[in-house]
């Protein structure tokens, strides 16, 4: 901090297990990745190479090295996992990500239907070599699961070896834990909160209103994801009570 | 591709005539233009210097050279053409763009009323020295043209010498081929598709939902434009079936 | 201008007192700030380090120097002022911003309730050492003030020493002088315009529709703020009649 104001929420030191910020990289250049590291490496825990972008950008290995050197953990988005599994190429997936140099893996079934026991096997399998995020929630309207299933699947995926479970929202923030207008699906989130220690959950929250909602519910050190690279510093001002929406939230 | 997955739609080699991606540059710095080239030169066919930005940015000639060196074809947006024509300065326009080093020109009447025969003359005239995009569709609410006029004007502009016709959507994606809420004007698009080979059409599609809609209708190699520079890689993941919305679209 | 078209509205030379563009910096890297200066230093008068970002980015002093060297005046957003005042640390605030090298200060009560006489004292106090922007309008729904209060407070804050008053809109452009859907609160703006010389007012206008609305009402050299760094050149095309929305507005 450039000035030590009192009554600013503390943040755990990196590498941390709560207060995580996961940023979505949709195809940054090396220089743009450096820019993110310059201003926000202290506030960024993970960078997700979104959907299948990791297969298409020509700078993959350099970018992964660059993030790691800045103390940020890169990984491939769950859609890439699904793209390999849809082709019965799970072993190739494991090999591809291991060779790329990442230490984190995501398991999801946002679009591809995967039997839940099989999904848990993938988690257990990858957890031997990687820190695993597993994602619960569909990207497809009409395929939504019940609140009880959300809770039960989160629990069984954590038991299967996931380090954190991610609550799905899509990049646009209008699915899963949110309504179509982007507002929180409060009953679902309360049902989850009642049953699972929220330190084990990373909530996708691409919109500012969603970030504010979760900070007010769970505090400055809630785990939030799908943050655009231009919104990491603004999110940090929300966590610290340095933006209008939370300016008075942490004062005595 | 960083890994050769099967069942990924093929893309023609550059310079190509279908599968085009046209990116909107609203005033990028030279370094930002380099960043675009680093990650996306393989996926970017044209860069449009949007509206009149080409008159205002101090880096014009260097930026045009930079794009050309990366195998990307830059050109000036149709609004600049209209700004010159509105002042009866068409000859100055032709001279200005020739001296700037571009090899592509756009003819449009999105705001300025131009009698259609006169518009076709501009196309024929410019087609002697440039590859011509001509744009059909107004930017002005209340001035919309009928479906039959869309089809007939597209045909006559191609006959007049346009290399491709652009279907107008505005930067915001809520005019022309789209409804005010951004959804596709399906009947219009079907009427066009029935009468004109869609390889000759470039559809403005600034929103992801619009890109998905066209890829599902016309395949991975549909020509799409008004793509933001941050969305070229995400669009390419849609074309390749590497994003949720199209993940299952190209599988056997 | 890369070509001297006739009938393009003139702009005062920098440093200017009207025709101001104030850009919102939400945490740019040094290189991104340089990129802004490369393309838009001629068109950018002020850069606001938004909300409390000035406390969090590690590059504060270098960035302030960089903007000043490019002829752009940087300052800290009003929320940071409120964060200090909420802690009874106004003297520390004045010292902090003086030491940072800025020459402009903002006084606001967007979230923190400040008695209006006290707010005017802060203005007078800071105006001894800084050029002062004071902001009128709340960020909080349900706390909106009457049109008469808008006018009276703007007048008294200018009398207290503010160089310009800022009309609040939030970063999202849906409060204060705008309706929840982002459209202008016309009656309020007309009431203000009737009573106050609009050269003394800087209107926050983050959305293109808002910028167009004000340019059509008050001309090319209206003072506009909360412009994103990627929208400075597009805004300048609107001011010059080089974009569809204003293409015909300045022609004879």
Image: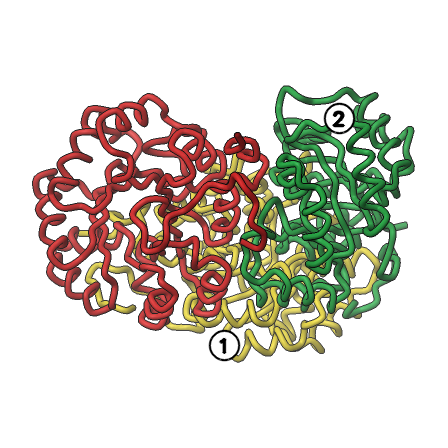
Chain colours: A yellow, B green, C red
Q: Position of residue A77 (x, y in %)?
A: 64, 60
Does A158 appear above or below C170? below
Residue A173 lies left or right of residue C48; in this view the side is: right
Q: Quadrant of residue A158?
A: bottom right
Say which quarter of the image contains residue B234: bottom right
Say whether residue C183 is left or right of residue B27.
left
User: Looking at the image, which is closer to me, C162 or C182?
Assistant: C162
Q: Position of residue C235 (x, y in %)?
A: 48, 45
Q: Residues within 10 Å of mark 2 (few under 14, many from 20)?
A: few
Q: In this orientation, which residue lies closer to the viewer: C241 or C25? A: C241
Element class at badge 1? loop
Q: Which residue is mark 1?
A: A70
Query: Callout 1: 10 Å neighbours few (<14), some, many (20+)?
Result: some
Q: Is residue C37 visible?
A: yes
Q: What is the chain identity of the residue bearing mark 2?
A: B
| Residue B115: image tag | 2
Marked residue chain, label 1: A
Q: Quadrant of residue A5?
A: bottom left
The disc at residue A17 is: none
User: What residue appears at the point 29 percent right and 58 percent down from the top-left corner?
Assistant: C75
């Amino acid at each position: 901090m450039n000035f030590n104001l009192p009554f600013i929420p503390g943040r755990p030191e990196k590498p941390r297990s709560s207060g995580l910020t996961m940023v979505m990289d949709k195809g940054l250049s090396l220089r743009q990745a450096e820019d993110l590291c310059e201003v926000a490496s202290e506030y960024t825990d993970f960078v997700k190479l979104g959907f299948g972008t990791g297969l298409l950008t020509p700078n993959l290995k350099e970018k992964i090295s660059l993030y790691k050197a800045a103390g940020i953990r890169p990984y491939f988005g769950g859609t890439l996992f699904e793209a390999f599994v849809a082709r019965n190429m799970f072993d190739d997936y494991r090999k591809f990500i291991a060779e790329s140099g990442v230490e984190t893996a995501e398991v999801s079934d946002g679009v591809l239907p995967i039997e839940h026991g099989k999904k848990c096997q993938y988690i257990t399998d990858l957890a031997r070599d990687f820190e695993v995020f597993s994602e619960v929630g569909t990207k497809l309207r009409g395929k939504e699961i019940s609140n009880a299933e959300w809770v039960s699947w989160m629990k069984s995926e954590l038991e299967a070896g996931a380090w954190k479970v991610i609550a799905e929202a899509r990049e646009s923030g209008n699915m899963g834990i949110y309504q179509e207008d982007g507002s929180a699906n409060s009953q679902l989130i309360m049902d989850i909160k009642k049953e699972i220690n929220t330190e084990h959950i990373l909530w996708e929250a691409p919109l500012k209103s969603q970030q504010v909602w979760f900070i007010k519910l769970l505090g400055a050190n809630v785990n939030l994801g799908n943050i655009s690279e231009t919104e990491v510093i603004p999110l940090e001002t929300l966590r610290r009570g340095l933006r209008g929406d939370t300016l008075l939230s942490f004062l005595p």
